[in-house]
Amino acid sequence: AKKESGDTLLDIGVVYENKGDYDKALENYKDALQVERDAADQNYEALCLNNIGTVYLAKGDTENALSYLQQALQLREKLAVSGDIAQTLSHLGDVYTSTNQYDKALSTYMRSLELWRKSGDAHGAASVSHSIGLIFQQQARFDAAVSSMQDAEKGYRSVGDRSRDMAETLIDLARTLSQTGSPIEATKLLLEANGIAEGLKNESVRALVLNAQGDLAFC
């Protein structure tokens, strides 16, 4: 019964995290972590550590995010489940990106991508390919950025993804293509991203599309 209460606390934490109530999410994740440790369930312990790390990152506390994600990675590498390791590596890459450690972020994302592909998770691979593309863009390596973002686009298409993730990938790919002299292709991608945003009824994604279209007009 106690183990079940830990799983329930974890589920409640996910709900709060998705709502953006990070303090409540942390409270539930940390309670869940203690229960899972008492129950000696290392798989769920690692998941709790991973989720606590992502919440700290969302709060802008990169020091705690790094600490918890490194603990999660250590445990997940011991358990040797490729997809789980890939997930935590991807979050660690996000921490390094947010602290402008781009070379460290890139090598971490590359490790994550290799493991997502090994585990056959096209969505995970697409997500991290997008992140890799953004780093290349930051480094003005535009051809490499286009290649990685096109990998992300193909991955999302392969699983029929029409979420915000796909829309943001199309927007960032369009921006990069416009920088490499392909404005027509960029315009087509922005139209598709706009269609996804309308389907989602998501005004923040619509705003991203309009902003990118405005930038494209001045290229």
Image (spheres, grey):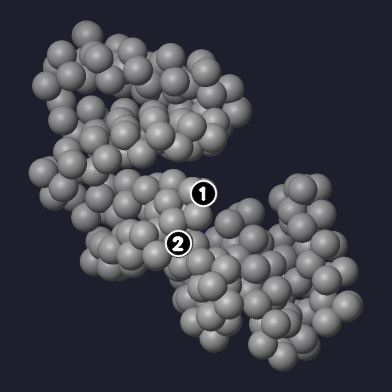
The residue at 71%/60% (across/down) is 196
Residue 8 vs 144, above or below: the answer is above
The residue identified by callout 1 is 98
The residue at 88%/78% (across/down) is 218
Judged left or right of residue 98, residue 122 is left
**Quarter location, residue 64:** top left
**Image spot of residue 17 (x, y percent):** 52, 28
**Image spot of residue 156 (x, y percent):** 51, 66
Judged left or right of residue 17, residue 211 is right
Residue 148 vs 202, above or below: the answer is below
**Image spot of residue 6 (x, y percent):** 29, 16
Examine the rendering and report whether any part of residue 163 can be seen. Answer: yes
Dot 2: what SS? helix
Judged left or right of residue 83, residue 128 is right
Q: Residues within 10 Å of mark 2 (few under 14, many from 20)?
A: some
Judged left or right of residue 198, residue 175 is left
Which three-letter amino acid code belongs to the residue tagged 1?
A: Ser
Residue 5 vs 134, above or below: the answer is above
Q: Residue furthest top?
A: 1
Dot 1: what SS? helix
The residue at 75%/71% (across/down) is 190
Given residues 21 and 4, the one toward you in this image is 21
Quadrant in the picture for the N terminus: top left
Residue 58 vs 120, above or below: the answer is above
Tag on residue 128?
none
Quadrant in the picture for the C terminus: bottom right
* Labelled pair 2, 1 in contact (Cβ < 8 Å): no
> Gap in Å between the C-alphas at discs 2 and 1?
9 Å
Which three-letter amino acid code belongs to the residue tagged 2?
A: Tyr
**Image spot of residue 19 (x, y percent):** 60, 28
The residue at 19%/34% (across/down) is 43
Tag on residue 102?
2
